[in-house]
């Protein structure tokens, strides 16, 4: 966009409501000093002379790196700059708060540098004592409950997406296998062969409605926040009609008609189902949703059951398995500290062995006291089956009864109760880490008091998108300010609400929703963050908080922590404090803005 057009759009946005910009020169000067703005206050006065404004913006652009200017103007629509807040027709005390909010937002959008309040992903960096690597929030381990590793005797690991990570090529390969099976074995239209896996379409934590074939995102209260029928979003009116205005789906309804998609393999199911349904809808082919859902799930499952996926991975292991350079060091450090290591996986031994040899080394089994494959989780936590030994040479399952587990041996089937009994281990002394909440963690914690850790790679992926997006930072700050204004103006409105009060609050809520949606679309254009469902916490995030004591983006994050680390509940990676000087300024306390010589602390907030 030409700079003159950019400046004109900014001017129109600013001038559209003159009352919103009565900011005094002294206040702007204080903000400029506090935020280290690299241009004099005279340039920031909200003067209605277009020529001076154009000169101001030209100088701002000049001070930014050229690459930054191009990136921001490409990413951010001009009409999103300097949002104009609605005003109350008669309550000047409310308007005083809103004007200060407008001033703060305007200063953020007219800055030539990043906002002083950084996104969560840029907070809390320090140097690792292990290898000198920089540790950001994306490498942190978050705690929902108190966990003291000194009191943990055993650390158990899942295999897939926990000890080893996979590239998107694996999901693409599974998609191709399942698509071909639909066409070749289930007689689906050959037109489906033209479709390709889209890693940007879905997120995990969704649920499939078996009666409609919709992909649904649920809030933590089990409300259907949004849904997709194929690749088309379902309207709010259609959602209301389908679920008859039920604000919270009961466990019985969820059990009868919803099928959760909670692990990373299920993203293939979501994408393929959306493509098939979308094709049927657009071509006018009648179909039964439940049958199509079941066919798609069977087709994807066949890639696992047949072993085709596993053979493909081991045939080109560098293509599919992501390198884990610190994994062996982490395992050795825990073993040296006196902790016992267990590996409990649903995969078969030949597959686990091939991957672990690649990731850790040929002697990987020497690091583990117990290796259990074909465990059949989550049934592993509820049944009482005996263990059977697996030949590490041939993979054959032996018949002899098992009354003890030999270190270095390989076992299959069994149960957690048998495992705890044979090894003489108390459940509270075990920490088990896995990527699937319901297959790996829920029953282990609920039935046996085992501490649990969820490996959620989306934590770091979403934070990387946040750090790389100017729009996300602006939207986050704008939402942050607007939410705080809600608290303040409702205090000014008192106990009663006039029609004008209600209208203003409705308009502000719409503005907050708009900016929150912008934030979410930076993460995923269709469903947003796996941790949010529209304005609420997602069902996935709620389940994670309830069933996971710890969570992290990767097992390798453990290298930044002591083997005797004490984890305290910290509010999670999305927590943002509401007590910074920017919000104090909105209240009307100019003294809250620090002098120009004040430095920012390590959190990125003004101190």
Image (cartoon, rainbow, N blue to C red):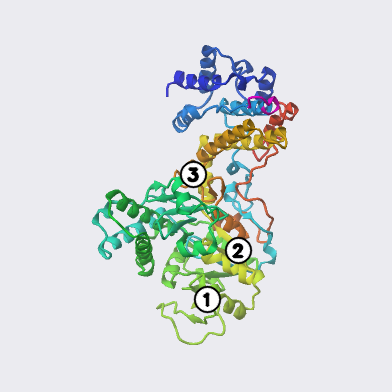
Q: Earlier in the sequence, mark 2 or mark 3?
A: 2
Residue placed at 52% from the left, 34% from the top? 470
Q: Position of residue 299 (x, y in %)?
A: 34, 64
Q: Locate residue 200 relative to residue 341 in the image: left or right.
A: left
Q: CA distance from mark 2 to mark 1?
A: 24 Å
Q: Secondary structure at mark 2?
A: strand
Crowding at mark 3 (Cα within 10 Å: few <14, some 14-19, many 20+): many
Q: Earlier in the sequence, mark 2 or mark 1?
A: 1
For marks 2 and 3, give the one nearer the viewer. Answer: 3
Q: Which mark is residue 452?
A: 2
Residue under pointer 3: 523
Q: Earlier in the sequence, mark 3 or mark 1?
A: 1
Taking the image as drawn, is residue 553 in sight?
no
The answer to whether the residue labelled 3 contacts the one labelled 1, judged by CB atoms less than 8 Å apart, is no
Tell me which corner region of the image, top left, top right, bottom left or bottom right, holds residue 122. top right
Residue placed at 61% from the left, 59% from the top? 546
Which region is colored magenta? 88-94
Q: Nearer the viewer, residue 266 or 186?
A: 186
Crowding at mark 1 (Cα within 10 Å: few <14, some 14-19, many 20+): some
Taking the image as drawn, is residue 143 in sight?
yes
The answer to whether the residue labelled 2 contacts the one labelled 1, judged by CB atoms less than 8 Å apart, is no
Q: Position of residue 195 (x, y in %)?
A: 30, 51
Quadrant in which the N terminus is drawn: top left
Q: CA distance from mark 3 to mark 1?
A: 43 Å
Q: Which mark is residue 408?
A: 1
Q: Is residue 364 above or below residue 246?
A: below
Q: Locate residue 22 relative to residue 200 in the image: left or right.
A: right
Q: CA distance from mark 2 to mark 3?
A: 27 Å
Q: Secondary structure at mark 3?
A: helix
Q: Nearer the viewer, residue 5 or 372?
A: 5
């Amino acid at each position: 966009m030409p700079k003159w057009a950019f400046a004109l759009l900014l001017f129109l946005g600013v001038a559209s409501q003159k009352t919103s910009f009565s900011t005094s020169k002294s206040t702007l000067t204080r903000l400029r000093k506090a935020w280290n703005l690299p241009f004099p206050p005279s340039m920031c006065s909200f003067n209605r002379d277009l020529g001076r404004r154009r000169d101001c913006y030209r100088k701002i652009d000049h001070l930014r790196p050229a690459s930054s200017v191009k990136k921001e103007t490409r990413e951010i629509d001009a009409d999103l700059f300097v949002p104009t807040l609605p005003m109350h027709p008669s309550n000047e005390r409310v308007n005083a708060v809103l004007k200060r909010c407008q001033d703060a937002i305007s200063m953020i959008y007219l800055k030539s540098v990043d906002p002083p309040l950084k996104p969560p992903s840029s907070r809390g960096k320090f140097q690792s004592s292990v290898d000198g690597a920089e540790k950001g929030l994306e490498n942190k381990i978050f705690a929902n409950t108190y966990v003291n590793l000194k009191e943990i005797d055993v650390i158990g690991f899942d295999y897939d997406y926990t000890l080893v990570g996979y590239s998107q090529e694996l999901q693409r390969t599974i998609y191709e296998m399942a698509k071909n099976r639909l066409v070749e074995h289930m007689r689906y239209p050959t037109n489906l062969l033209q479709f390709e896996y889209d890693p940007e379409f879905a997120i995990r934590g969704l649920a499939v409605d078996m009666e409609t074939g919709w992909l649904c995102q649920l809030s933590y209260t089990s409300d259907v926040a949004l849904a997709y029928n194929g690749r088309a979003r379902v309207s709010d009116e259609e959602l209301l009609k389908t679920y008859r205005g039920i604000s919270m789906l009961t466990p019985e309804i969820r059990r009868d008609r919803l099928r959760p998609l909670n692990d990373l393999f299920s993203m293939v199911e979501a994408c393929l189902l959306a493509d098939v349904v979308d094709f049927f809808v657009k071509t006018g082919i009648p179909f039964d949703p439940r049958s199509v859902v079941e066919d798609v799930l069977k087709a994807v499952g066949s890639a696992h059951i047949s072993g085709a996926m596993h053979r493909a991975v081991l045939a080109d292991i560098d293509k599919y398995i992501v390198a884990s350079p610190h994994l062996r060091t982490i395992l050795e450090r825990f073993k040296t500290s006196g902790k016992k290591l267990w590996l409990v996986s649903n995969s078969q031994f030949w597959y686990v062995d091939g991957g672990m040899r690649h990731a850790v080394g040929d002697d990987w089994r020497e690091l583990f006291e117990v290796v259990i494959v074909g465990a059949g989780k989550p049934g592993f936590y509820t049944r009482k089956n005996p263990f059977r030994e697996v030949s590490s040479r041939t993979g054959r399952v032996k018949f002899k009864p098992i009354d003890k587990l030999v270190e270095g041996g390989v076992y299959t089937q069994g149960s957690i109760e048998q495992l705890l009994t044979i090894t003489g281990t108390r459940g509270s002394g075990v920490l088990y880490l896995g990527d699937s909440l319901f297959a790996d963690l829920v029953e282990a914690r609920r039935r046996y008091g085992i501490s649990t850790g969820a490996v959620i790679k989306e934590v770091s992926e979403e934070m990387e998108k946040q750090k790389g997006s100017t729009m996300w930072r602006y939207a986050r700050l704008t939402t942050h300010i607007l939410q705080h204004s809600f608290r303040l103006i409702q205090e000014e409105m008192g106990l009663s609400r006039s029609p004008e009060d209600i209208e203003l609050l409705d308009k502000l809520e719409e503005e907050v929703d708009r900016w929150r949606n912008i934030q979410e679309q930076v993460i995923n254009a269709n469903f947003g963050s796996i941790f949010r469902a529209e304005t609420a916490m997602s069902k996935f995030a709620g389940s994670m908080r309830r069933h996971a004591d710890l969570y992290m983006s990767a097992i390798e994050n453990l290298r930044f922590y002591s083997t005797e680390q004490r984890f305290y509940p910290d509010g999670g990676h999305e927590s943002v404090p509401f007590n910074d000087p920017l919000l104090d300024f909105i209240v009307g306390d100019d003294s809250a803005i620090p002098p120009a010589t004040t430095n920012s602390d390590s959190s990125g907030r003004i101190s």
